[in-house]
Each structure stands twice: as C-alpha cells, then as structure tokens.
Amino acid sequence: MKRDGATTRSAAARTGPAIVVDGLTKRFGERTAFADVTFDVAYGEVFGFLGPNGAGKTTTVRTLGTLLAPTSGNATVAGLPLTEANGVEIRRRIAVMPESPGLYLRLSVAENLEFFAGLYELDDRRARIERALRAVNLLDRASDPCRALSKGLRQRVGLARALLSDPEILFLDEPTSGLDPLAARDVHDLIDGMRRQGVTIFLTTHRLAEAEALCDRVGIMNTTLRTIGRPDELREQLFAKTLQIATRDPLTDPDAVFGGLPGVEGWHDGAAAAGGAAYVLTVTDAELAAPAVARAVVGAGADLLALSPSRHSLEDVYLQLIDEDVEARTR
Amino acid sequence: MNTTINPMSWTRIRALIRKEINDYRRNRFIAVTMAVLPVVFMISPVITIFKLPADAPASRIDTVVGLSLLYLMLIPALVPAVVASYAVVGEREQGTLEPVLTTPVRPAEFLVGKALAALLPTLLISYVMYGIFLGAVGAFAHENVVHDIFEAPRILAQLLFTPLLAGWSIWVGIAISTRSGDVRVAQQLSSFASLPPLAVAALVGFDVIKPTLTVALGLGLALLVIDVLAWRVVSVLFHRERLLTGGVKA
Ligand SMILES: Nc1ncnc2c1ncn2[C@@H]1O[C@H](COP(=O)(O)OP(=O)(O)OP(=O)(O)O)[C@@H](O)[C@H]1O
Ligand SMILES: [Mg+2]
C-alpha cells in the first residue's frame, strides 16, 4: 500500500524511540492503577501489553493517550514529552482505540468517521474514510446506523476510526475482545499490515497466542511492570531448557548414559507412559545436546521412542509470573 | 492555567456542530421537545390575545401582552436547556467521550461546538415562532393590542433577550451535564435552572419597569455579562480528565 504524505513526513522525523516511559505512576486517590513503570517502544515495533484484569493496562493507555495526567514520572510519546501543553500535538500523531468502541449509535458508520475526520482536520475525507472502511471490510455497511451493528462490527468501526488519521502510533486496547476467531484473524492481519507500513502499535490483549504471534516484544504488567522482552527471550529467562526423552524400557544406568554428554547439565525422571520410561534432561543448548543424547541412548541398547525439546508458550510465562504475584499477595 | 492563547479550529467546531445536530435530530426526546414545546408556547399566547375583548382596558392589554411575550421567551430558555444538558452526560453514557478526547480537539472547541449546536437551532426556532406570533397577531388582533405588541422596545427586547436567555440556559445545561451521571436528571435540573433570568424579562413584560429602549438595552447588557461569566465558569469545569470521569468519585 502506498504511504501518504503524513506518514512519510513522520517517518523522516523518527529519531529515538516512539514511546519512552520512565517511572510512570497513576493513582486514583488511594488506589494505585500502575506504579513506577519504565519501558521504551521503538518506532515500527508492535508492543504487546499483557496483564490480568485490573493490572493497569487501560489506565496506562489512557495516560499515554493524554486522557489522564500521570501522578508522577515522565513519558515521551511520538517524540514529545507527555505534558498538558503538548497534548494537542501528541494527539495529532497518535490514535487510540479504546476498550469499548464508543460510537454514536444514532449516526451511521460514515457519519461517525466523518465527525472524527473533522476533529483531526483531515483533507480528502471521503477518500480516507473509504480507505479505512475498506481496510476493515466494512465498505458495504457505511450508511448503516451503528446501532444496527453487531459487537464485532462496531469493534471494526472503532478500528477504522483509529486508522483515519494515519497515526504514527496506534494504541489498541483489546482490539479482538469479543470477536469470533475469524474476525480476530482479520484484525491480526490488519495489525500485521500496519506493522509492515511502519506504524508503531501498542497492543493490550488477554489473548496470549495473539501477543506471541504479533508482537515484537511484550511487557507483562500487574500494577508494576513484571517483565519485558521478546516472547522467546521471556521463555528462556523463566524456564530452564529441557529435553524430554521416552524409551520403551527403563535405562539400566541413566547416569552413565547421560553423564558427560555435551550440553547436558543434569536429568530427572519424567512422567512415563505405562510400561515405558521417561527422562527430563536440563540442557544448555538443545540443538547441541539432542543428537548426542540420541546416540547415547541408542548406544546403550535402548529403544528411543521420543526425543523433544520442551515447548513453553508465552502463556506459561504469563501464568508463572502472575501466579507468583497471587502467591505473594496471599502469603 | 494555559497562558498561550490557541486559536480555535473552526473545522473542528463545524464537525462538532454537524455531528450534534445529526445526533439529536434522531434522539426522540430532544426532537419531540424541539418540535412540540415551541409550538405550545407560541399558540397559547396567540389564543389568549385573540380572546381579549375589543374594549379591554389598556392596563389589561398590557398585562396580557407582557405575559404572552414572556411565554414566548420560555422557548429560548427551555429548548437549549434540554439540548445542552444532554451534551456531556449523553456522550458519557454512550462511551463516546473517550475517543473524542483522544483526538486533537481542545476542551474550548468542544465547549463552543456544543454550545453553538444548541444555540443555532434555538435561535431559528425562537425567531420563527416569534415571527409567526407577530404575523398572526398583526393580521387578526385588535388594533390597540397590535400597537402594544409592535412597540419598538418590546420587539428589541424580544430579539435581544432570545439569544441571551438561550446563552444562560446553554451554559447552565452544560455545567449540569458535566457533573451529572444521568441524562433525565440533568435535563430536569437544567430546565429549572434556565428560568431565573426570565425574571429580568418579566420585569419588562409586566411593566414593572417601563419598556423603553434604554431599559431593553440595559437589561440586555446585564444578561450578556451574566452569560459571559457563566461561559468562563463552565470553561473551568471543562477539564479533560473531569469530563471523562464525571468529576464524581466512582
Ligand atoms: N477512573 C478511575 N477511578 C478509580 N479507579 C480506577 C479508575 N480507572 C481505573 N481504576 C482502577 O485502576 C486499576 C487498573 O484498571 P485498568 O482499567 O487500567 O485495568 P486493566 O489492566 O485495563 O484491566 P482489564 O484487563 O480488566 O481491562 C483498577 O484497580 C481499577 O479499578
Ligand atoms: Mg483494560
């Protein structure tokens, strides 16, 4: 897709990160929504923001979107310090799709978008509205009143609205919540397309597979930022790398078989199928260890049934971290 | 307080006005209020005037004319109160405030857009109703009544007070709306709050103060000052974060 003037201009101005958050805290009276959060998001990055209900994700989006003033700390959004004076200019450069789409239900889809195109002072409104509606597959519903749209379709109007102004940074607060798998996939494709156009995307979601598939990096929040990194990095940080082995009969001397193999640090018994045997090996590098382990097991005269590296998903990482928090709180 | 004065964007204000008018055209309560209420407040004084006997004493004519014109002024007081009180709480109920406030629109533009969207149709409706009233009375009422109604100070007062009364109702309606969590309550409160300035109009209407040009202009000026003050107060209430959360602790 061809970029228009606004996006090209912003691309030229892109020096430094898209978002810098430094010790940011937001309290509502006694209640702390999030505290001392620090992270950066690079231009062109898709950043996933995960965390349980009430973790402070929406409040963070609202704060970075200039809707709420932070209680303390600093932030830079789209190259501008997050201050009240910069509010208008920041909002010109970003778009936010809130948790609930917030459409004027008595107005048609096109009227909703026209209003927002006016608020952004966009030229060429018809063409932009058409383009945004085409992107979310809603061109044929343009004149329908929003009241008559299903939840998923309303969500898509919200997305179209966020695309209207060709933002540098797009904040999406749970864009696929309540969508059927097919509609969710459409949204994923759309996010992927935006990423290819160089749009920076800040995505909050409860769908961990979504974050894993779409995001360059993720942060896991629970009032404070618990961890941040690439999904594969996080897996490695949190979980020891292992190899799972299954044999038809128990090995006579597992220590002798596994001891001294390259990349293998230790072993323990695994959960075996009836009659068989299973072992879990802690390894430094699965690629190095696996062939050696296979040779050693076969060399020991055993029948090797399966040999696989452990697979931890982002969900495992998430559950591990959040479980720790729950335990810490109940202790 | 922001010291730099930012010029308002008329593009954004125009977009707001168009959206507002599209929206409340389809809002049954507001549409019915705008259509029915003005007709009622125009027809009933016309009927009263038509029922005046030809030989009614001058003082009686004065009272009836004063009351009639006061009735007509209920239009610019009540119509915008109903519309304006919906302005913020209506958006809050639909959850539309959040997406709007993430656009570059400034609170001042939002406020002016909302106010004009209530003022413009109010002026149109009020003047049209006044025009119909003058036409009907001019054509069919007794000559001495016509003479009284077409007195220059009375006409000036009516023309002048219409936008000024509307202005008060709009600011009060919006102020109540920013603080309210319920559309109906906001509309009722605003309707009551729109009435006090009518007292000023009533002074002229009932000849407590003789309706001279100076009096009409002076009272107009007083209303204008009140309107401007009300605007300043509402501008302060129009704080982004407070708009979003309603300023009421959840
Ligand atoms: N306007 C507000 N006033 C008071 N407390 C608030 C307000 N908004 C949010 N909170 C509180 O701040 C905390 C964080 O809320 P937030 O909506 O940011 O969570 P979230 O991570 O988006 O949750 P979810 O996954 O359910 O959307 C919660 O405890 C919430 O009750
Ligand atoms: Mg949320």
Image (cartoon, rainbow, N blue to C red):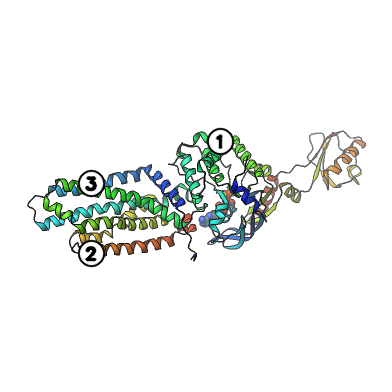
Categorize mark 1 by other alpha carbons within 10 Å: few (<14), some (14-19), many (20+): some
Q: Of marks 3 and 2, which one's residue comes earlier in the chain?
A: 3
Q: Which residue is mark 3?
A: B132
Which residue sits at x=89%, y=41%?
A292
Q: Quadrant of residue A207?
A: top right
Asked if badge 3 and badge 2 are on a common chain, one would say: yes
Which quadrant is home to the C terminus of chain A?
bottom right
Could you tell me residue B170's position as x and y percent? 35, 55
Distance of label 2 from label 1 (alpha carbons): 63 Å
The number of discs equals 3
The chain letter under disc 1 is: A
Could you tell me residue A226's position as x and y percent? 67, 55
Using the image, tell me which numbered label, if any, was put on residue A137. Answer: 1
**Kind of residue at badge 1:** Asn
Q: Nearer the viewer, mark 1 or mark 3?
A: 3
Could you tell me residue B63's position as x and y percent? 15, 57
Of residues B142 and B165, the one drawn nearer to the viewer in this rendering: B142
Using the image, tell me which numbered label, if any, was put on residue B215. Answer: 2
The chain letter under disc 3 is: B
Q: Quadrant of residue A191?
A: top right
Q: Secondary structure at mark 2?
A: helix
**Kind of residue at badge 3:** Ile
Could you tell me residue A154's position as x and y percent? 51, 40
